[in-house]
Image (cartoon, rainbow, N blue to C red):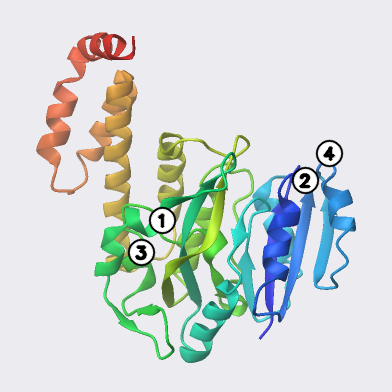
């Protein structure tokens, strides 16, 4: 059961050799790496040319963005399974082996993901908290133990189970997918943030999922990341969620989506309120009033408080002096 590992790369010379090495060092060796060089202008190509492992395939394209690069690789994938790794991140050495054991033990699975840790590019120390630490409700989703020695299977509908969680549980770097189930799904070209969220939301509609509650991926934080704070993701996340509203959803799936949209709107309203952007906060709160999220009174109070925004701005200036 061969795995195609897709790796988009743009000016990734500082990190790509380490990322590729973490794949080639996997204890599960039946794999190929498809690196799509997205028009790099540094020495990324020189580094790729220096790697002689026959499992590495390199495609050169003009710069069209990470989504287009991933789609280019997807077009040539012919293996049973597909996985993703960014050119600045790392896999632990038994990641694929453990995920493939789950697929063997649970043939109905179409997606297996794992936890991950972030690490700072300026420090060799891995940050102690993992992604799943921020998603305590993940453990409360109905699940059962797998037939192998590790991992769990989500027993309910994947979309309904995973969409309402406070944070996105399935970062593409941690996922392995059955190719035939997701072959038709593409990453949205022209979307600079949350393109992976939109992709995964569509994947949820096609697969049964399981996960390993251990960090099998190391996500690097550095100065060239696509975003630097969670606040930057608020509006792109909302756009991605709204895009899924046009999909064919069951009532339960649509209810789960609306719950997530309401949660995201509330986060956006709070952010703009404390930032002092009164009109943007008002727009989010007014839209939020149409959702039955159980917090209409809180939203109404926040909306009525907007005329006092100047006071909020005054105390914010005092705080940051």
Residue assigned mark 1: 130
Comparing labels 2 and 3, the label whose residue is closer to the camera: 2
* 132 sits left or right of 119 in the view: left
Tell me if label 4 and label 3 are in contact, CB under 8 Å.
Answer: no
Above or below, 17 relative to 4: above
Instruction: Please report the residue visible at 26 percent of the width from the left and 26 percent of the height from the top.
Output: 282
Q: Position of residue 106 (x, y in %)?
A: 46, 88
Q: CA distance from mark 2 to mark 1?
A: 27 Å
Comparing labels 1 and 4, the label whose residue is closer to the camera: 1
Q: Quadrant of residue 25?
A: bottom right
Earlier sequence position, callout 1 versus callout 4: 4
Earlier sequence position, callout 1 versus callout 3: 1
Q: Position of residue 196 (x, y in %)?
A: 54, 54
Instruction: Please report the residue visible at 88 percent of the width from the left and 66 percent of the height from the top.
Output: 52
Tell me if label 1 and label 4 are in contact, CB under 8 Å.
Answer: no
In this view of the protein, can residue 172 be seen by the observer? no
Q: Between residues 144 and 269, which one lies in front from this camera angle?
A: 144
Q: Residues within 10 Å of mark 2 (few under 14, many from 20)?
A: many
SS class of the residue under badge 4? loop
Instruction: Please report the residue visible at 73 percent of the width from the left and 70 percent of the height from the top.
Output: 24
Residue assigned mark 2: 13
* 122 sits left or right of 76 in the view: left
| Residue 162 badge | 3
Q: Between residues 69 and 262, which one lies in front from this camera angle?
A: 69
SS class of the residue under badge 2? loop
């Amino acid at each position: 059961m061969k795995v195609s590992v897709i790796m988009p790369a743009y000016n990734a010379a500082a990190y790509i050799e380490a990322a590729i090495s973490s794949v080639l060092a996997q204890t599960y060796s039946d794999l190929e790496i498809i690196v799509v060089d997205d028009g790099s202008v540094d020495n990324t190509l020189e580094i790729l040319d220096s790697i002689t492992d026959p499992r590495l395939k390199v495609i050169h394209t003009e710069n069209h963005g990470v989504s287009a690069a991933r789609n280019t690789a997807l077009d040539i994938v012919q293996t049973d399974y597909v996985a993703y790794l960014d050119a600045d991140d790392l896999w632990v050495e038994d990641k694929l082996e453990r995920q493939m054991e789950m697929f063997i033990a649970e043939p109905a699975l179409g997606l297996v993901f794992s936890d991950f840790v972030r690490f700072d590019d300026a420090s060799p120390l891995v940050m102690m908290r993992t992604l799943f630490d921020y998603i305590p409700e993940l453990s409360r989703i109905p699940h059962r133990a797998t037939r192998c020695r590790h991992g769990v299977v989500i027993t309910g509908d994947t979309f309904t189970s995973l969409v309402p969680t406070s944070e996105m549980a399935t970062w593409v770097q941690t996922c392995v997918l059955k190719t035939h189930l997701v072959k038709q799904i593409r990453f949205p070209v022209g979307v600079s943030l949350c393109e992976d969220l939109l992709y995964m939301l569509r994947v949820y509609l096609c697969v049964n999922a399981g996960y390993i509650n251990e960090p099998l991926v190391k996500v690097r934080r550095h100065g060239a990341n696509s975003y630097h704070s969670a606040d930057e993701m608020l509006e792109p996340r909302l756009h991605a969620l709204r895009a899924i509203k046009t999909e064919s959803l069951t009532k339960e799936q649509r209810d789960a989506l609306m719950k997530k949209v309401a949660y995201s709107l509330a986060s956006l309203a709070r952010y703009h309120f404390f930032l002092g952007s009164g009109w943007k906060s008002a727009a989010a709160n007014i839209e939020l009033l149409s959702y039955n999220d159980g917090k209409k009174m809180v939203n109404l109070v926040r909306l009525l408080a907007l005329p006092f925004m100047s006071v909020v701005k005054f105390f914010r200036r005092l705080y940051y002096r």
